[in-house]
Image: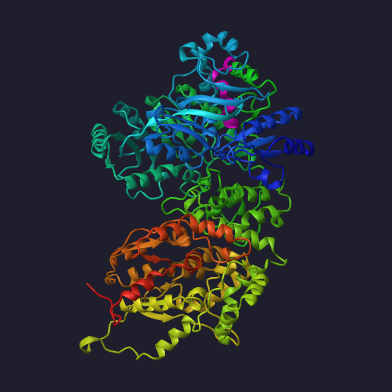
């Protein structure tokens, strides 16, 4: 392959990657399959594409075109050269609102086209649930559809002309009336007219095989349409002219509740007469929380459009009246509709786990039958599942008869794989018996191509082979897809993984303690590759900053998968490729919540670093910042904060310290507090009179609820003003604030610590020791049974990242210590403490807007519902943006991370603050967020506790109702 690589580098202007990382990132798509490519090329233009094909043809090396890599049948993987069309061939070339057409390159993400078309009242009709990361080229290759196909059809219905390069270098412009047809194609069709007129089922979602019937004269001999769905086997797309549709000015979403999925499926076809935009179906076992949905065990999502909101609502209400439902609702509010659609779109990831947490896999993801037969098909499908002892949760495009389902195949051993094959064969026969198509949206790939003779018969499949030969006589393009396929039970991506669990530090309770199972969670749906964050989402800030697959959650998971496989990444935990990909992971934990399958890359990163540096010297930042609690405790114990601050103000000394400590030279050192928070709290308690033994009027005193305020490292040493403010607010609310115990030492106190900095740098032995000491200290406060009349302890943690570490990382790192789970359950945020301990308290009314960003760990682990309610009670209006500030604890301070850190901040946080009105309160509960705002924008952010404390009445009392 050395000659191949050298020739490609000399022939193309785009990037050529034959290194381990480049290849590892594309071994898989979103399917069950895995192939290791020889190399990856990111062509800059059509000339580069032609040059790649010429070189690969000379070497007899296959070429596979790849877009977003979200295909679920294996067609975006290959053993030759993979063309990454997303890096450079990703432009919207033209958009003409008069003709309602757009000219796009294949790597353009669908959402970018939709954003450009929206100001003109237009849109691209097909919209798969992966619309935020799938590409137009991939959609054309698979003939994708999406939820609006009942109104606007498949991608093939939206294609006008296609520019392609064939395997032998011909550049063709495909269109109607045989435009661009390669020599021999028309003669092939003319000789098989009868077969082409009778051999294809009449289905709205017939995607399987080649669409040769589009070449019939009565269908306009449309070569572009026939090319759609060819899965990169006929030519390489370089440009497409597509049709846009008029978007309705207003929409309503009718959600119809039914007893079960069969009832919903039976009803779907009858709703098509109302000309809806969508008829989507899903059952309750795919819904994480039914809140906001009408009563029922299954639902149809029926979208209607109109010129006005009233017209759209009227059409939605007409659908409800015409449907026999248990319950229903009609939503016209755009935000409410988006929230409901997210429930449906996340099903593609949620379905990868059964309700009991066991794994489920694609392979029979998108069969389609005539809509009128959907109910009967689903009943037979359920029976077939039961006969094989399998489970699956169907959902999908009920109005088109297209069903998505992931099934709990055991693809890890030979018996499970054999059952997978038997079930696939029997299900193919069942689909055909109902007049259906093996693929209704995602294509055949390796998953179903072997079974195409069951649907079409051997003569039609032989005709497909002849058509492939006309376009690609050397079988250079994506061989093994659609024709002459590899068996459906080979090349499975699980076959290379270790069979026994590896010894690891974390418990991985949701994955049975198996790190391989945790890594397998990533199925490639690539929600982490979304190029623009929206709403409260966080994942994946490093990908959005760099645009590199290696810096996405999926890319890192792929490298970990290859590390476990040991075939491509051969040095295991010592892998520099994995280390480098994880280096720009901010450990924001956004993927823990935003990833539909709950990949927790922050934990995987900590695990990897733990093993990678075992017995080896670590980066300087791991010693300086990873062990920050130790150094700051020493400073506090020796009362040298003033001296440290003075030294840090001397630039040459600060620069030397930064260089020695692995700190980014662009950063300023935060100032240390002269008086730590705990010292202030003890001094304050000594100066206050003891509580009175009697209550008002001489009666017995009712004890105030007690909260233990956690002295996290940041509140203790860097921003004690937050702790002081929290004490004032809690006491104003009638809560007694107690200090946590500490064990004095000669140079530093042994105080409770969440271990966050040790966790984020992968110093897990030290983290385990620190957390063990914390549990020892707090054991009297968190007994197994508090006893009658004793309230359960409440530990208020003001720093969200520390609270998240205690609530999530602590029990996962010490899964066998029951005290860990008890302490985690007792951890609350500031807002949660007020809600739990002072439910009748009314905060001061501020009547001001807020701006800022919800802390990424709060979003991912803790939730911010209580904070929203507290802000509303204080008349703090508006929402905080999502995303990550980019500082992320030690990340933004580490040498080499400054530019990525700054890019993350400039994505959402800094623009939100800059756009806020002058009177807005800048909220930032995390120390990192406040530091980032101060250092990059000169803006002072404040913890919610500080804002409320400043608004209390002079005597410090809060107002009660």
The answer to which quarter of the image holds residue 64 is: top right
Can residue 496 be seen from the camera position used here? no
> How many numbered circles are shown?
0
Furthest-right residue in view?
3
Q: Position of residue 34 (x, y in %)?
A: 64, 39
Front position in the image: 221 or 558:
221
Quarter of the image containing the C terminus? bottom left
Can residue 204 be seen from the camera position used here? yes
Front position in the image: 692 or 920:
920
Residue 127 versus residue 584 in the image, above or below: above
Q: Position of residue 565 (x, y in %)?
A: 68, 47
Seen at 39% across and 77% down, the residue is 725
Range of magenta residues: 443-460
Residue 131 versus residue 708 in the image, above or below: above
Quarter of the image containing the N terminus? top right
Residue 467 is covered by the magenta coloring: no
Magenta span: chief secondary structure: helix
Q: How is the image coloured?
A: rainbow
The answer to which quarter of the image holds residue 370 is: top left
Q: Position of residue 498 (x, y in %)?
A: 67, 49
Residue 554 versus residue 961 in the image, above or below: above
Seen at 72% across and 66% down, the residue is 615
Q: Is residue 44 left or right of residue 442?
A: right
Front position in the image: 739 or 510:
739
Residue 453 is covered by the magenta coloring: yes
Q: Position of residue 112 (x, y in %)?
A: 47, 40
Front position in the image: 770 or 96:
96
Furthest-left residue in view?
697
Residue 716 versus residue 359 in the image, above or below: below
């Amino acid at each position: 392959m050395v000659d191949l690589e050298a020739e490609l580098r000399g022939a193309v202007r785009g990037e050529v990657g034959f290194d381990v990382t480049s290849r590892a990132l594309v071994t898989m798509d979103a399917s069950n399959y895995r192939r290791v490519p020889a190399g990856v090329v990111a062509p800059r233009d059509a000339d580069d594409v032609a040059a790649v094909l010429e070189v690969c043809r000379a070497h007899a090396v296959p070429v596979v075109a790849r877009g977003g890599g979200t295909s679920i049948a294996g067609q975006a993987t290959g053993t030759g050269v993979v063309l990454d069309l997303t890096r450079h061939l990703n432009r919207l070339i033209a958009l003409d609102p008069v003709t309602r057409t757009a000219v796009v390159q294949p790597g353009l993400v669908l959402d970018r086209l939709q954003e450009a078309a929206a100001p003109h009242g237009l849109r691209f009709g097909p919209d798969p649930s992966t619309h935020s990361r799938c590409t137009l080229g991939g959609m054309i290759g698979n003939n994708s559809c999406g939820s609006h196909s009942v109104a606007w059809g498949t991608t093939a219905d939206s294609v006008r002309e296609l520019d392609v390069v064939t395997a032998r270098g011909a550049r063709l412009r495909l269109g109607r009336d045989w435009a661009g047809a390669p020599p021999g194609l028309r003669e092939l069709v003319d000789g098989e007219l009868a077969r082409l007129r009778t051999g294809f089922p009449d289905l709205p979602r017939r995607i399987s095989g080649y669409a040769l019937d589009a070449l019939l004269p009565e269908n306009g001999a449309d070569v572009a349409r026939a090319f759609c769905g060819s899965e990169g086997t006929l030519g390489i797309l370089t440009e497409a002219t597509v049709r846009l549709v008029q978007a309705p000015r207003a929409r309503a979403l009718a959600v119809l509740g039914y007893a079960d999925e069969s009832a919903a499926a039976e009803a779907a076809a009858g709703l098509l007469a109302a000309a809806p935009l969508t008829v989507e179906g899903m059952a309750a076992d795919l819904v994480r929380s039914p809140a906001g949905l009408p009563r029922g065990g299954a639902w149809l999502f029926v979208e209607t459009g109109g010129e006005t909101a009233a017209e759209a609502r009227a059409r939605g209400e007409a659908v409800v009246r015409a449907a026999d439902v248990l319950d229903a609702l009609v939503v016209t509010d755009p935000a409410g509709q988006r929230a409901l659609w997210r429930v449906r779109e996340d099903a593609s990831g949620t379905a990868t786990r059964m309700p009991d947490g066991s794994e489920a896999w694609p392979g029979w993801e998108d069969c389609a039958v005539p809509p009128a037969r959907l109910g009967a098909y689903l009943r037979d499908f359920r029976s077939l599942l039961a006969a094989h002892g399998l489970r699956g949760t169907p959902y999908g495009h009920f109005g088109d008869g297209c069903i998505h389902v992931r099934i709990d195949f055991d693809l890890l051993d030979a018996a499970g794989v054999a059952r997978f094959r038997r079930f696939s064969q029997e299900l193919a026969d069942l689909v055909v018996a109902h007049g259906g198509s093996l693929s209704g949206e995602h294509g055949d790939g390796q998953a179903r191509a072997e079974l195409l003779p069951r649907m079409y018969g051997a003569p039609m499949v032989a005709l497909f082979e002849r058509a492939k030969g006309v376009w690609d006589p050397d079988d250079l393009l994506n061989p093994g897809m659609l024709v002459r396929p590899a068996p459906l039970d080979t090349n499975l991506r699980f076959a290379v993984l270790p069979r026994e669990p590896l010894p690891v530090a974390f418990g991985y309770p949701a994955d049975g303690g198996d790190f391989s199972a945790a890594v397998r969670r990533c199925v490639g749906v690539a929600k982490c590759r979304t190029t623009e964050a929206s709403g409260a989402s966080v994942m994946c800030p490093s990908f959005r900053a760099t645009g590199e697959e290696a810096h996405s959650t999926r890319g890192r998971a792929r490298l970990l998968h290859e590390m476990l496989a040991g075939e491509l990444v051969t040095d295991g935990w010592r892998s520099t490729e994995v280390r480098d990909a994880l280096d720009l992971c901010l450990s924001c934990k956004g993927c823990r919540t935003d990833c539909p399958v709950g990949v927790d890359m922050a934990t995987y990163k900590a695990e990897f670093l733990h093993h990678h540096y075992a017995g080896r010297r670590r980066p300087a930042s791991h010693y300086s910042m990873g062990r920050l609690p130790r150094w700051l405790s020493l400073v506090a114990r020796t009362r040298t904060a003033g001296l440290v601050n003075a030294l840090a103000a001397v630039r040459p000394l600060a620069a030397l310290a930064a260089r020695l400590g692995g700190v980014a030279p662009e950063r300023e050192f935060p100032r240390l507090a002269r008086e730590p928070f705990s010292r202030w709290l003890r001094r304050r308690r000594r100066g206050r009179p003891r509580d009175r033994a009697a209550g008002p009027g001489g009666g017995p005193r009712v004890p105030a609820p007690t909260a233990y305020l956690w002295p996290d490292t940041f509140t203790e040493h860097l921003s004690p003003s937050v702790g002081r403010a929290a004490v004032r607010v809690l006491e104003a609310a009638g809560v007694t604030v107690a200090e946590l115990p500490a064990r004095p030492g000669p140079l530093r106190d042994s105080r409770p610590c969440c271990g966050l900095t040790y966790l984020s740098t992968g110093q897990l032995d030290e983290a385990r020791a620190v957390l063990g000491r914390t549990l020892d200290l707090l054991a009297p406060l968190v007994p197994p049974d508090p006893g009658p009349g004793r309230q359960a302890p409440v530990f208020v943690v003001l720093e969200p990242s520390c609270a998240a570490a205690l609530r999530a990382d602590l029990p996962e790192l010490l899964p066998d210590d029951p005290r860990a789970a008890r302490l985690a359950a007792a951890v609350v945020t500031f807002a949660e403490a007020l809600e739990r301990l002072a439910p009748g308290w009314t905060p001061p009314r501020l009547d001001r807007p807020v701006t800022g960003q919800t802390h990424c760990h709060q979003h991912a682990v803790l939730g911010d519902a209580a904070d929203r309610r507290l802000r509303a009670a204080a008349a703090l209006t508006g929402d905080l943006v999502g995303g990550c500030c980019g500082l992320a604890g030690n990340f933004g301070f580490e040498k080499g991370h400054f530019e990525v850190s700054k890019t993350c901040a400039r994505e959402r946080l800094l623009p939100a603050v800059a756009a806020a009105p002058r009177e807005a309160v800048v909220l930032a509960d995390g120390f990192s967020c406040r530091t980032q705002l101060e250092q990059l924008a000169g803006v002072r952010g404040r913890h919610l506790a500080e804002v409320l404390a400043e608004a209390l009445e002079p005597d410090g009392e809060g107002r009660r109702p």
